[in-house]
Image (cartoon, helix red, strand yellow):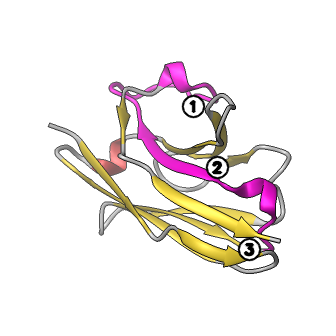
Amino acid sequence: QVQLVESGGGLVQAGGSLRLSCAASGRTFRDYAMAWFRQAPGKEREVVAVINWSGSFTYYVGAVKGRFTISRDNAKNTLYLQMNSLKPEDTAVYYCAAPRLPGPLGYDSSRYDYWGQGTQVTVSS
């Protein structure tokens, strides 16, 4: 059974940094693309960043481009999200996600079948 466990969230001032981690277990991590999503209060869940199986391709939503970096360590079965220059509008619960089957990268939550429990990121102004 696939399990995803996020960590690294917290409270930070605007302009600060956080690094989220997602530990994966239950199958061969390196065979699948992975993604980070976030959901702010009263808003729909949105994709933040996507990475292919090898880490050679990444995608970022426009609002975080140039500030966030998605990466993965397949030897450690871990996905990361380095978040710099944080803004109050980045406040949300952040989730890592994985698809059930290999295939094209997905940029919508419907592509992903496995989700972590989420980690809260709060950015104060």
* Disc sitting over residue 57 in the figure: 2
Badge 2 element:
loop
In the image: residue 88, left or right of residue 70: right
Q: Nearer the viewer, residue 48 or 99?
A: 48
Badge 3 element:
loop
Residue 60: x %, y % from top left: 74, 47
- Which of the 4 quarters of the picture holds residue 11? bottom right
Q: Nearer the viewer, residue 15 or 19?
A: 15
Is residue 107 located in the magenta-colored stretch of the structure? yes
Residue type for callout 2 = Phe
Residue type for callout 1 = Leu
State which region is magenta: 85-111
Position of the C terminus by quadrant: bottom right
* Disc sitting over residue 105 in the figure: 1
Asked if disc 1 and disc 2 are in contact, CB closer than 8 Å, the reply is yes
Specify few, some or many for label 2: CA neighbours under 10 Å numbering under 14, 14-19, or 20 or more. few
**Residue at 65% of width from left, 42% of height from top?**
40
Camera-side mark, 1 or 3: 3
The correct choice, above or below, for 109 with respect to 63 in the image is above
Q: Earlier in the sequence, mark 3 or mark 2?
A: 2
Q: Which residue is mark 3?
A: 84
Instruction: Give the spatial CA distance, label 3 vs label 2.
Output: 20 Å
Asked if disc 3 and disc 2 are in contact, CB closer than 8 Å, the reply is no
Q: Nearer the viewer, residue 31 or 90?
A: 90
Residue type for callout 3 = Asn
Position of the N terminus by quadrant: top left
